Image (spheres, rainbow, N blue to C red):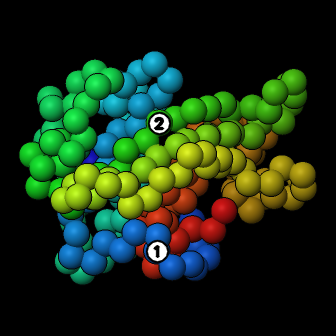
Amino acid sequence: MKLAPSGIATLSLLLAGCGTHPASVPIEGKRILVIPFSEGARPPFESRLGRELAVGISAVILDERLENAAILDFRDVEGLAKGTDVDWRAVGVAAKADYLLIGNIREYRLREPKDLTTRRGTLAVEYRVLDVATGADVLLVPMRTFHYPPDTSRHEESFNYGVDIFTDPGKIAQGLLLEASLGIAGEFLEHGHAE
């Protein structure tokens, strides 16, 4: 579960600009398993984007180097989580996890509808954090939307990101994935990423 060197550098730059808010889910001393997000009809583990998002979220949490918190490798439970009717609590028990982050990608696009010139990525997700011991959700987010670049209303924004954000779909996809990873991981961190 490693990011490319350019992704890590970008992630570090984005982390430096994080705002603060209290963590929604305290993870001190906890073992967390981030399940690859499902995407539309694709169940978890079958979406490339869902896997990349899980790796990104895990990388952000690991980068914070929280004492006594551990990120578990989702590949260890992939065989237990096939199909759409998965007993997530049983998966968490098998993985010896305290929390599972489970989500679904509701929307993913790299350009604004009806606009052929301006590219702006949108990623809308729903997710929850399951407490494996109790089987209860400790966090439920029915919809959260991320954009990259965050604001295209001012053309000078493209210079702040160091790329031509209006024409490079690869950079938009990478930035969008990092923006979402930071935002979702922020649910666990004392210094979460402000939307």
Mark 2 and mark 1: Cα distance apart in space: 21 Å
Residue lying at 34% horizontally and 31% vertically, measured from the top left:
44
- Residues at marks 2 and 1 touching, judged by CB atoms closer than 8 Å: no
The one nearer the camera, 33 or 119, is: 33
| Numbered marks: total | 2
Q: Quadrant of residue 8?
A: bottom left
Residue lying at 46% horizontally and 74% vertically, measured from the top left:
23
Q: Amino acid at mark 2?
A: Asn
* Element type at mark 2: strand
Which residue is tagged 1?
23
Q: Amino acid at mark 1?
A: Ala
Residue lying at 28% horizontally and 21% vertically, measured from the top left:
83
Which residue is tagged 2?
104
Tell me if mark 1 has few (under 14), some (14-19) or many (20+) residues whose alpha carbon lies within 10 angstroms of its own: some
Question: Which residue is the extreme one toward the right?
Answer: 154
Horizontal relation, residue 157 to residue 63: left or right: right
* Element type at mark 1: loop
Horizontal relation, residue 190 to residue 116: left or right: left
Tell me if mark 2 has few (under 14), some (14-19) or many (20+) residues whose alpha carbon lies within 10 angstroms of its own: many
Report the disc number at residue 10: none
Horizontal relation, residue 178 to residue 50: left or right: right
Measured from the top left, where is residue 158 in percent x and y?
Answer: 78, 53
Residue lying at 47% horizontally and 36% vertically, measured from the top left:
104
Measured from the top left, where is residue 2 in percent x and y?
Answer: 30, 50
Above or below residue 30? Residue 109 is above
Looking at the image, is mark 2 or mark 1 earlier in the sequence?
A: 1
Horizontal relation, residue 36 to residue 155: left or right: left
Measured from the top left, where is residue 130 in percent x and y?
Answer: 32, 53
